Amino acid sequence: MSMNWSVGLTESFSFRPWRLLTVFYLLPGVVGTIILFKMPDSPKILLSIGKIDDAFAAVEWIALQNVGKRLQELNVDKIKYDVFTDRENVPSVSYSPMVSFKKMWQETVPLLRSPHLRNFSISCTVMCGLFFSSSGMGLWYPEILNRLGSSIADDAMTVCDVIDASVNQSKLNQTTTICVDEINTKSYIDTITYGTALTMGYILMGFVINQIGRKAAITMGLAIAAGCAISLVWIKNEVIIIICFCLYLVLPGLCVSVLSGAVVDLVPTKLRGKAVCICLMLGRMGSVFGSNIIGILLETYCHVTFEVFSGFILVCAFLSYLLPM
């Protein structure tokens, strides 16, 4: 990101270092996809749909990878599969989109009925709020700190003052539409600080939950995060700004894992996978909405942006207190 080179591919498109970084971010997903093509299906899934021979081959592949021996060498001749005779909860495979969607809906409906509807709805709302704040604002965290680190003002300024000053300066200097992708080197240190805080938070969260429980951990964490968000409106000390920013992003991010574990305990075993997947899906949608709302409001209504996000976190803290966890 600190490199200063450009390869002009067309008159309006230049390949810059940040585009190369995006390509590098893409590579792990590509490698993972290629590896998945080499992996067999789950033996349990294969047994549940009656593919006994394929399941045996999958288990043998696992044995070869783990101990380097075939099942016959381990005195295993067949797989016991009579435990999968309950066809009611067995996953079905269909090549018809309508049949697949109907099956998905039938598996989802129990979550939308009593006694699971209340807790599941609250969990989805809180999860959406957690991603809305942590991932939504997290996307803009490097950009905000980059502007803060690039500020040349003599007096201490709040985050919104820095953003307003950068917007005014760009309006004065702007003659043509130019993408300015210069990054202050201090932004890297701030981002590393955020990553370190997130790592340490995950380590400490286990001890905190054991002492005060999940409900208190989520409620207190979100309350602190909301206070940090609203304080960013008037704090001028750069070090305290970074600390508050890190707490505001880290605490909701830590609560995602805690809430996911709570959802598992709030629904029956056969609904747990579906419930967690829907919760996380809505959470990802919240991060998309959050990042776009910040992009629209931050430069024009900076104070309102932080106030709205702070209020949303407080609402999530109250809702999480209502969950029986």
Image (spheres, rainbow, N blue to C red):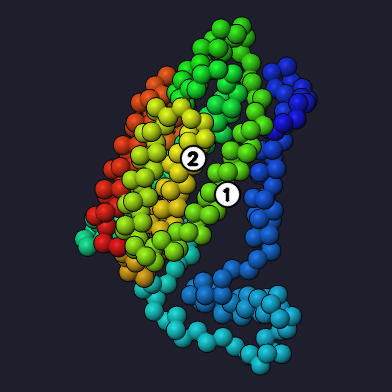
Q: Residue at x 42, y 72 (%)?
A: 90
Estimate how packed mark 1 is, as few (under 14), some (14 to 19) or many (20 or more) residues with alpha carbons within 10 Å: few
Depth check: give the residue in front, 259 or 282: 259
Which residue in the protein does label 1 denote?
196
Q: Residue at x 69, y 64 (%)?
A: 38
Q: Position of residue 255 (x, y in %)?
A: 41, 53
The amino acid at mark 2 is Ile
| 158 left or right, relative to 183 | left
The amino acid at mark 1 is Thr
Q: Tell me the SS state at disc 2.
A: helix
Q: Residue at x 55, y 53 (%)?
A: 199
Q: Which mark is residue 243?
A: 2
Q: Position of residue 243 (x, y in %)?
A: 49, 40
Depth check: give the residue in front, 114 or 142: 142
Residue depth check, mark 2 versus mark 1: number of the one nearer the observer: 2
Q: Position of residue 296 (x, y in %)?
A: 44, 24
In this picture, is 201 found above or below 232? below
In this picture, is 104 found above or below 188? below
Q: Quadrant of the C terminus?
A: bottom left
Q: Tell me the SS state at disc 1.
A: helix
Depth check: give the residue in front, 108 or 277: 277
Can residue 87 be seen here? The reply is yes
Q: Quadrant of the N terminus?
A: top right
Q: Position of residue 154 (x, y in %)?
A: 55, 17
Can residue 288 be seen here? The reply is no
In this picture, is 286 found above or below 232? below
Estimate how packed mark 2 is, as few (under 14), some (14 to 19) or many (20 or more) residues with alpha carbons within 10 Å: some
Q: Are marks 2 and 1 in contact (CB under 8 Å)?
A: no
On the image, which quarter does residue 21 sit in? top right
Please tell me which of labels 2 and 1 falls first in the chain.
1
Q: Residue at x 39, y 62 (%)?
A: 209
| 48 left or right, relative to 219 | right
